[in-house]
Image (cartoon, helix red, strand yellow):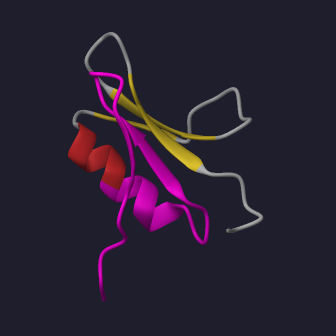
Amino acid sequence: MSSNPPVHVLPHRLGTWFVQREGDHEPLSEHGSETAAELAATRDAGAAEVIVHDRYARVHVARRAEV
C-alpha cells in the first residue's frame, strides 16, 4: 500500500465528476464523464490508489493503463 493518500473519483449531483485527493477540501479537477475523470485520476495520481465511486454507491479501485 502506498503512503500517498488515495485519489477519489466522485459523482457530483449536477452530472459532472470530480477527482479529489483524500483529505483535500477542493477537487483536483472536474470532468464531464466518469471515464474522463478516471483517466485523469490514474494519469495524475502518481503512486496513489485511485478509488472510483459510481452513482449507485458502488466502489472499485481503478486499474492503471499498461504502457
The mark total stands at 0
Who's the residue at 26% across and 39% down the image? 34
- x then y, percent, for residue 24: 71, 34
- x then y, percent, for residue 39: 32, 57
- x then y, percent, for residue 47: 61, 71
Residue 31 is left or right of residue 45, and the answer is left
Q: Vertical placement of 63 versus 32: above or below?
A: below
Q: Vertical placement of 14 versus 66: above or below?
A: above
Q: Is residue 55 magenta?
A: yes
Q: Residue furthest top?
A: 13
Viewer-side residue, 52 vs 26: 52
Q: Quadrant of the C terminus?
A: bottom left
Q: Quadrant of residue 64?
A: bottom left
Which stretch is magenta? 39-67
Q: Quadrant of residue 3?
A: bottom right
Who's the residue at 34% across and 10% down the image? 13
Who's the residue at 71% across and 52% down the image? 5
Q: Is residue 47 magenta?
A: yes
Q: Quadrant of the N terminus?
A: bottom right
Q: Vertical placement of 58 versus 41: above or below?
A: above
Q: Vertical placement of 40 versus 65: above or below?
A: above
- x then y, percent, for residue 66: 30, 84
Who's the residue at 55% across and 42% down the image? 28
Viewer-side residue, 46 vs 58: 58
Residue 67 is left or right of residue 48, and the answer is left
Residue 8 is left or right of residue 11, and the answer is right
